[in-house]
Image (spheres, rainbow, N blue to C red):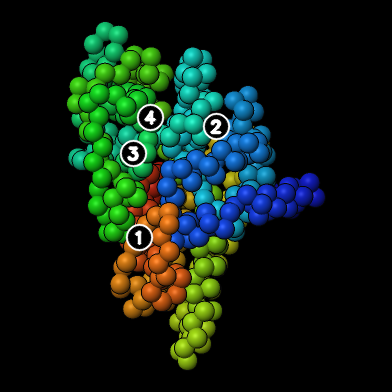
Amino acid sequence: MDLKFTQEELDFQKEVRSWIKENYSTSMQRTYVNSPNGHLIKEDHMKWQQALYKKGWAGVNWPSEFGGASFGPSQKYLFNKEMASANAPSVVAFGEKMVAPVIMAFGNQEQKEKYLPDILASKVWWCQGYSEPGSGSDLASLNTKAEDKGDHYLVNGAKTWTTMAQYADMIFCLVRTSKEEIPQKGISFLLIDMKSPGIEVQPINTLDNTPIGYHEVNTVFFENVKVPKDNLIGEEGKGWTYAKYLLEFERGNGYSAELSSQLGKVKNIMLKRDDSASPFKDLHYIKKISELEVQIAAMEATELRILGSISTGENVGPESSLLKTRGTEIGQAITEMAMELVEYYAIPFNNPGPNPGHNEEPIGSEFANTSAPRYFNYRKASIYAGSNEVQRNIMAKLVLGL
């Protein structure tokens, strides 16, 4: 395995760094830094993603036949590393990174032509309809029903923890189209227009205390929602197969670059403390920082090894469970340490959200205002995309052969 980068790849890294400097405005940086949940408002997200599209850097993981950036594995790694180092907004995953690969792999030609160009150009906002009030990690028990009515399905039920559904134009949904002895066999994969009559989106108030309108998660209700048969992906009853394929992309993201960036912010908090009990004089904090740096370095080595496999045509496979488990656990440790460092300045919990025009100075350091919200918000990371307990079962079975 050769982990060295070529001169051409290093030149590409410099190009990415320069482009970010020119296009990532100071106002957007400030808004993003002050965001309690790591999100911008819809307009800012779309503006950023459309700038990437104009540059030809949308669809980093897409094949060229669908208009993707045609990055090799090393370019993808360096691109993500520079974006994380600059604390640039992540591309909203639901369209480009999640439903798009499913459409490419299992959709028909008409669906590919209808949906993929608008996803790539960030003209349509997607959300994910998997979890339900009674079905989370046990997703196969879902009850949202799609009845066959000839030329359309009639959908009734509810999806919950639906991220950014208040912005969404479309939702990809797992629905039950038949009752089978094995519940996974009765699930289908539907694309549903969020403007359809009978859809209601209700916000969920969470511990990060984000104002309504800037909140992150919702419950989506479906009451007699008509969905054309043309919106069925692949075959009826094969939705579970497509869902597992999608989750491999959701879990198999690189984490090390973002984790390094987040740990850098924690170090910055430590540097800006001017009291006599500076954390840099405390061996407890020095030990914690060192341990996290070693864990991130190990994560980076694992990601580079996987990149080497991908470059030979292999899929991420069960290693995606490893990345998801360790990446989210390290991330939670970093947010916890940030809370410890800002100490009582985290208590006021005055959380304005990424509100344009908000210019109130934070209490304490610039990090204090978001440390508590991000700590509470990131508790979910070890649960979504399949809880880490489930991921360990997958690794035990598919990696260790137990």
Q: Few, some or many C-alpha atoms within 10 Å of disc 4 (few <14, some 14-19, many ≥20)?
A: some
Q: Which residue is mark 3?
A: 165
Q: Amino acid at mark 4?
A: Met
In this rendering, does residue 130 appear at all?
Answer: yes
Say what secondary structure mark 3 lies in.
loop
Q: 72 and 26: which one is in front?
A: 26
- Which numbered marker is on residue 44? none
Q: Are marks 3 and 2 in contact (CB under 8 Å)?
A: no
> Where is 152 relative to 365, above or below?
above
User: Looking at the image, is mark 3 or mark 2 earlier in the sequence?
Assistant: 2
| In the image: residue 92, left or right of residue 152 | right
Say what secondary structure mark 1 lies in.
loop
In this rendering, does residue 3 appear at all?
Answer: no
Task: Calculate the distance from the C-alpha at mark 3 to the C-alpha at mark 4.
Answer: 9 Å
- Which numbered marker is on residue 352? 1
Say what secondary structure mark 2 lies in.
loop
Say what secondary structure mark 4 lies in.
strand
Q: Are marks 1 and 2 in contact (CB under 8 Å)?
A: no
- Which numbered marker is on residue 170? 4
| In the image: residue 239, left or right of residue 150 | right
User: Looking at the image, is mark 1 or mark 2 earlier in the sequence?
Assistant: 2
Q: Which residue is mark 2?
A: 121
User: Looking at the image, is mark 4 or mark 2 earlier in the sequence?
Assistant: 2
Q: Amino acid at mark 3?
A: Ala
Q: Amino acid at mark 2?
A: Ala
Residue at the spot 25% in from the left edge and 24% down from the top edge: 197
Q: Amino acid at mark 1?
A: Pro
Q: Few, some or many C-alpha atoms within 10 Å of disc 1 (few <14, some 14-19, many ≥20)?
A: many
> Where is 39 relative to 43, above or below?
below
